Amino acid sequence: MVHKKNWGKISFYLIASIIAMVILIPFFWMISTSLKERGALMTIPIQWIPDKVSFEAYQKLFKVFPFGRSILNSFYVAVMTTFITISSAAMAAYVFAKIEFKGREKIFALYLATMMIPGQVTMIPNFLVLKYMGLLNTFTGLMLPSLINAFGTFILRQNMMTIPNDYIEAAVIDGASHFTIFYKVILPLNKPILAALAIITFLGTWNSYLWPLIILSSKDKMTLPVGLSLLNGQYGSQYNLLMAGGLISIIPILIMFLFAQKYFEKGLSLGGIKG
Amino acid sequence: MPFKRNGKRFIIILFLLPSLFGLIFFSLTPMVSSFFISLTDWDVISGSPKILGFSNYLNILQGEEFWRTLKNTLYFILLYIPLMLLTSLFVANLLNSKYKGITLYRAFYYIPVITSWVAGALIWKWVLSPQYGVINTILGYIGIVGPGWLYDEIWAMPGIVLASIWKDVGFFGLILLAGLQGINPTYYEAAEIDGANWWQKFRKITLPLLSPTIFFVIIISIINSFQLFPQVMIMTEGGPHGATQVMVERIYKYAFEYYKMGYASAFSWLLFIIIFIATLVQLKLQKSWVKYGT
């Protein structure tokens, strides 16, 4: 007789595997398609596994588009944006959490209020300002708006507030400056949340589409999503090419995810940050 | 008072400077100027803006396009929200167990979440191909002739909904899972002693105690629904015959393809107002069904 517990176990693995399969089939299809020759794309019945494996799409991809360059651009922009966002937010959060001054709560409320403004309202004036500053099609222009991140500031402030003031007072008595306290006390104590925020900022920037689409116009400046969408516009039906590009754009973030799944999950559950 | 290096005032100014700069120049000022731009006719290329007053707003509200995008978005929400809630609740409950290998399953479910929307939309455009896609092939195995999906006015939006569920179920499943794990297990133990079955436990314990999390998920996903963009741009470009045109896609096209900055800004303010109202309505409605612990 099968024990009741075993049934629970069996049905768990069965259902969980079916869902995993449904979720992974599109990825399987992407990989399979990227390894097909152009002639094998539109066959009836479809070829789940290519009859003949070919790297034609990958060769062509790097020929028709500076895709290697896009990968580097994406890395550069994601790393720098993460650094800018986190430093700017952490510094502000420290002031809002630990240094009292007149009008502090009002300024903080102003930060929070910006969370309500959809990016679509500010993107047109931001585009125009960057245009007049001559910063269109530059990474500086692309990254400048990430100086303000109300959500990150808010989360970090909440965490910093839980650090007892005694720690800070003790450090002040020892003659430590605010810089030292910030770097040696506050930041180390907030490492897990900083890591989680950094990871979702990196992820959001890596995957970001609308803003880079507006700002970046030359092929050698494009990040992966913008490059992919351009490719989609030019080779809309050459799916082996598009799937090869899509796969390449996913692999770096997938590798990061496999190494830091815990932090990804923590970061993602912080809230609905959208790329 | 002179600034003392490392003095309190010096530190406050120095530490707030980067974010204040961003706040003022890339958030507050743009918000105000966006409103003023929305009162003008401005193509940026040929010179200075022409002041129109509110006629951009009137034109948008009197044209059929705005109402079509609203209708399309509501169609999306109507399909997406219930389906997304059901699937992510199911996934969250499934993952709320201690079986071996659970981390691996979680990893599988998150892969679409960490994938960019552009790559995801490209995959789904191909998956949904009427003749050569896997969905209609699988439907064919069980004798169903699949629809034209993205080429069909009625089925294009459901196609985008399917892609969106696939992309988001891991994310919302994760949020709901965190909510589930916050429920005190003694409630379930007490219910089991009273002989409650799983449905009664779900209905009487899980749902009420999870309702604040569900509410959060609904708020976030409705805001996101009004901001649909990459999936539409990549999969359909708003077609066929405008069946998947949505607000952000229109705003993008008006501003950056037709260079009608005033018209696009007015459109973006209408979007803001709609999101604002939708959120307010939900905050009001929550009182009737969200149970906050005391």
Image: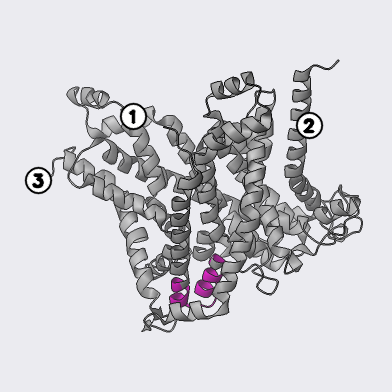
Q: Is residue B250 magenta?
A: yes
Residue A205 in view: no
Q: Quadrant of residue B245?
A: bottom right
Mark 3, residue position: B2
Mark 1, residue position: A162
Specify few, some or many for label 1: CA neighbours under 10 Å numbering under 14, 14-19, or 20 or more.
Answer: few
Q: Is residue A196 left or right of residue B113?
A: left
Specify few, some or many for label 2: CA neighbours under 10 Å numbering under 14, 14-19, or 20 or more.
Answer: few
Label 1 SS: loop
Whether A24 is drawn above or below B230: the answer is above
Question: The residue marked by circle 1 belongs to what chain?
Answer: A
Q: Amino acid at mark 3?
A: Pro
Q: Amino acid at mark 1?
A: Thr
- Between marks 2 and 3, how big is the CA–CA gap? 71 Å
Q: Is residue B191 left or right of residue A149?
A: right
Q: Which residues are magenta?
A: B248-266
Viewer-proximal residue among B236 and B256: B236
Residue drawn at x 81%, y 48% is A32
Q: Are marks 2 and 1 in contact (CB under 8 Å)?
A: no
Measured as percent of width and height from the top left, residue B192 is found at 63, 21
